[in-house]
Image: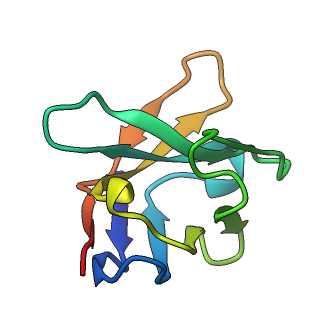
Amino acid sequence: QVQLVESGGGLVQPGGSLRLSCAASGIIFHFYDMGWYRQAPGKQRELVASITRGGSTNYADSVKGRFAISRDNAKNTVYLQMNSLKPEDTAVYYCNAVGITKERPNYWGQGTQVTVSS
């Protein structure tokens, strides 16, 4: 059974930092491209950052220079370091895994709430 379990969300003041983690099980982690998405109330889910199995990264323009995605294949975990947080970063953050096989299996975590407020 595939599980993606996010952790690290919470309430933080503007300008603060958080580090999200996503622990994967039930998949061969290094065969998956990983990503973080977020969804704010009343808005569509959007890509925040992604990292390929080879380590190439991609970021939404809104988070470039503030967020950093990384992965530890030995721990089957992907991270999202979030610095200089803004109120507009408030959302539920979801971990995503996409397999590199032709079937492109796609899995989601349950989400973790990030609230940026003073």
In this rendered view, identify the residue nearer to me: 113 or 95: 113
Which residue shows up at 68% across the image and 64% down it?
68
Residue at the extreme left: 42
Asked if residue 84 lies left or right of residue 2, the reply is right
In this rendered view, identify the residue nearer to me: 87 or 51: 87
In which quadrant will I find the C terminus?
A: bottom left
Which residue shows up at 14% across the image and 33% down it?
42
Residue 16: x, y in percent? 46, 83
Which residue shows up at 35% across the image and 51% down it?
94
In this rendered view, identify the residue nearer to me: 108 or 114: 114
Q: Give the quadrant of residue 77.
A: bottom right
Residue 2: x, y in percent? 36, 51
Residue 11: x, y in percent? 25, 81
Asked if residue 49 lies left or right of residue 56, the reply is left
Q: Give the quadrant of residue 31.
A: top right
Asked if residue 79 lies left or right of residue 105, the reply is right
Q: Is residue 34 above or below residue 11?
A: above
